[in-house]
Image (tube, rainbow, N blue to C red):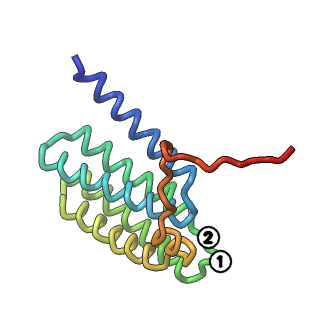
Amino acid sequence: MFGSSNSHGANAYAKVGIETGVISASPHKLIIMLYDGAITSLTNATQFMKDNDIPAKGHSISKAIAIIETGLRASLDKKAGGDIAASLDALYEYMSNRLLQANLNNQPEGLIEVQNLLRDLKFSWEAIAPVTNQMSAEVPPPPIDPLAPRSATLFKA
């Protein structure tokens, strides 16, 4: 009774959550989300490779490559970023090529290598988070109790 429609509902709910996160995210957080997406895709691809699920493996690896190329690599500002941006560009190109080779040759070690590189970059990116983001993350806003009594505002006539 709840089999496929429940799964579809859960997927739709997750998609809305991700879209809402993207809309409200800072540029810094968006890069972290891209790293997370690529890492998750490679985790899935590694499992699909072990299960010999060729179509799913190819889809997951293609998704990771797309995130690297059209998300991470395309967001580099080579003029402002100088040598760091150029180095990252070369590293992202290496990652994409490595994933292509790993896919063609069924090499899980290639997937794991790129996944580890992405994790290292993600941790480094998190370490340079803007101070305002760190402070707002440390002090959450007080919870609002919708059932709590509210003070009345009285006006004199």
Element at label 2: loop
Answer whether labels 1 and 2 touch (C-beta < 8 Å). Answer: yes
Q: Could you tell me which quadrant the N terminus lies in? A: top left
Q: Around disc 2, counting alpha carbons within 10 Å, would you say few (fewer than 14), some (14 to 19), or many (20 or more)? A: few
Give the number of marks.
Answer: 2
Q: Is 5 located above or below residue 95 in the figure?
A: above
In the displayed structure, 63 sits above or below 72; it is above
Please tell me which residue is depicted at 32% across the width and 50% down the height of the picture.
61
Secondary element type, mark 1: helix
Left/right placement of residue 109 relative to residue 58 reads: left
Which residue type does callout 1 highlight? Ala
- CA distance separating discs 1 and 2: 6 Å
Q: Residue at image x 21%, y 41%?
A: 54
> In the rendering, which numbered label is found on residue 27?
none
Q: Is residue 53 left or right of residue 114?
A: left
Residue at the image point whose x is 23% and y is 64% from the top: 112
Q: Residue at x 37, y 53 (%)?
A: 64
**Horizontal side of residue 27 vs 145, given as left or right:** right
Q: Which residue is mark 2?
A: 77
Residue at the right extreme, as displayed: 157
Q: Residue furthest front?
A: 157
On the image, which quarter does residue 2 sit in? top left
Q: Nearer the viewer, residue 9 or 118?
A: 9
Q: Whole-percent x and y of residue 26?
A: 57, 62
Measuring from the top left, give residue 14's x and y in whole percent.
Answer: 39, 40
Q: Residue furthest bottom?
A: 83
The residue tagged 1 is: 80
Amino acid type at image mark 2? Asp
Q: Quadrant of residue 111?
A: bottom left
